[in-house]
Image: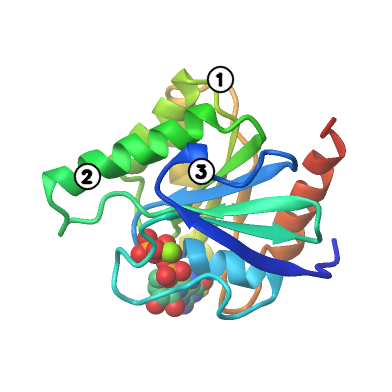
Amino acid sequence: MIIQSAEFLQSNTSVKDCPRPDYPEYAFIGRSNVGKSSLINMLIGRKGLAKTSSTPGKTQLINHFLINQKWYIADLPGYGFAKVSKTSKAKWDLMIREYLLQRPNLLTVFVLIDSRHEPQKIDLNFIHWLGTKEIPFSIVFTKMDKLSKAKVLKNTDQFKREMLKTWAALPPLFVTSSENKTGRDEVLGFIEEVNRGWK
Ligand code: GTP
Ligand code: MG
């Protein structure tokens, strides 16, 4: 898919204020600092459009972008950031869960997993929750440029095995790097295909 246009639309704290659900939507979620905003910039080819930071907790709101005048991206705040209070965690939970459960045009949630780590409970729990709510999702491994191919394979294989303990089949999986654009064509190709099924 060729990206002809990408614009930031709005930031919201509540699903009811999000842009009209007139176009297919893809949300990016995962642990704080996993690389959600960087991946979005890499996919749409615009470096600073989604705000990134080396400090976890940069994205705090539901941020909408309109791509090619035809589909939306939602950049979401990360979970699992150690330095947040119980109140902010509860707020995150409410905001994100409401968004995920009530957004009618949400076609796929991309769950980002840091390819450097062994399977983490917090990610597996979140994925399990998506499953119980029947929310369609894909897995995107990030930051693969930071380790050897062999190590990426080892960690992704381990993650798949862990998922197959509770799931009958695996969701679509992508291995990416925002540094060197690995996985860009695959993720955009997938979005293009899913867009075709819209209305
Ligand atoms: P929050 O909004 O805070 O939840 O973080 P996020 O998931 O949006 O992460 P963000 O894109 O802000 O990236 C976090 C840090 O990881 C930044 O310092 C990025 O430069 C770095 N980073 C993200 N993706 C990659 C990647 O593919 N490779 C490398 N080497 N670094 C990356
Ligand atoms: Mg972010």
Q: Name the residue under label 1.
A: 168
Task: Name the foreground residue: 107 vs 87.
Answer: 87
> Do residues under tags 1 and 2 come within 8 Å of each other at their CB atoms?
no
| Image depth: mark 2 or mark 3 in front | 3
Q: Residue at x 36, y 45 (%)?
A: 119
Q: Mark 3 points at which residue?
A: 17
Residue 118's label in the rendered image is none
Q: What element carries label 2?
A: helix
Quarter of image, res 137 = top right
Which residue type does callout 2 highlight? Answer: Lys
Q: Name the residue under label 2.
A: 89
Q: Is mark 3 on a helix, strand or loop?
A: helix
Whichever of callouts 2 and 3 sits on the residue coming sooner in the sequence is 3
Q: Residues within 10 Å of mark 1 (few under 14, many from 20)?
A: few
The image's colour scheme reads rainbow
Whichever of callouts 1 and 3 sits on the residue coming sooner in the sequence is 3
**Is 19 positioned to the left or the right of 190 in the image?**
left
| Image depth: mark 1 or mark 3 in front | 3
**Is 169 positioned to the left or the right of 120 in the image?**
right
